[in-house]
Amino acid sequence: MSLAETIAPQLPYLRRFARALTGSQESGDAYVVAVLETLVADPQSFPEGNMKRVGLYKCFLKVWNSISLNRDDIAPKTQADRSLEAITPRPRQAFLLASVEGFTTQQIAEILECSTDEVTQLIEEAGEQIAEQTATDVLIIEDEPLISMDLEALVKGLGHRVSGIARTHREAVAEVKRKTPGLVLADIHLADGSSGLDAVNEILLGFNLPVIFITAFPERLLTGERPEPTFLITKPFEPNTVRALVSQALFFGTNARVPDASAAGFQRGPRLATSTPPAGARAARP
């Protein structure tokens, strides 16, 4: 298979990444074209390895970091676009590679040509910079004390506040009524046999907010009854993954919604403010 045939399926995702990185489709596409021209002129410059997608993004960032193209400052930008510009370049690259493109820490290290420890540090730095713009209250719905303590430490480490920790469906709903969070981290199987999924569905009848499920039972979100869009982390989780998804969910304003708002239970209250993510920069995965 030729190099062109190898990388062609990855170009839509590279364009998505380039658009999020630069803040405009025109500028992002210009960088993609520059990468393709470089590879046409010198096919041997494409990195060797089994993961061609990693090699393509590695080539792209080498070009992006080495040349300067004119940006269209007149092009309209969303709040997320402007906020991305406020994140310093290397942390921004690591954050987008993890949260938007779904690369592992090892793959990001290869793309950025650095150690995995540096990748973790870069994502933490991006999370801190994002938290300066999006700091909020986080509700943790988790019945395992050690896990809830770990999540609390991760959330506070990013600069957010923990509004409460709930061990059951009833406690979760009560916590939201006491103080409306800006983000929910939820397990599915709770202490008294109740469901974190049911708790989230009830909460979402009253409020619009992002939800991240952290669970050892991911199959329970495959019933067609889960909130959409949903972020899902499987236990045991990597702290780096939690940091990246918390930052992504708040940064792009990716609110969940209950599938059937006519379901009884929670009287609809004031909606939280939402923001529109940049085109293609949601949680889609290739």
Image (tube, rainbow, N blue to C red):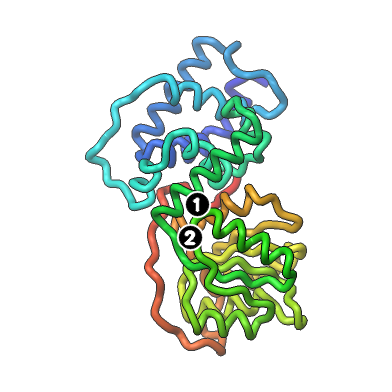
| Residue where numbered disc 1 is placed | 282
Measuring 61% from the left and 44% from the top, which residue is drawn there?
A: 102
| Residue 124 appears left or right of 251 | right
Measuring 47% from the left and 76% from the top, which residue is drawn there?
A: 180
| Residue 16 appears left or right of 24 | right
Q: Nearer the viewer, residue 207 or 219?
A: 207
Looking at marks 1 and 2 on the same chain, the residue that comes earlier in the sequence is marked by 2
Circle number at residue 142: none
Circle number at residue 254: 2
Q: Nearer the viewer, residue 249 or 178?
A: 178
In this view, 90 is above or below 264:
above
Do residues under tags 1 and 2 come within 8 Å of each other at their CB atoms? Answer: yes
> Callout 1: 10 Å neighbours few (<14), some, many (20+)?
many
Measuring 50% from the left and 52% from the top, which residue is drawn there?
A: 282
User: How far apart, in angstroms, are the residues tagged by discs 1 and 2?
Assistant: 7 Å
Q: Nearer the viewer, residue 169 or 127?
A: 127
| Residue 85 appears left or right of 15 | left
Measuring 49% from the left and 72% from the top, which residue is drawn there?
A: 181
Amino acid at the residue labelled 2: Thr
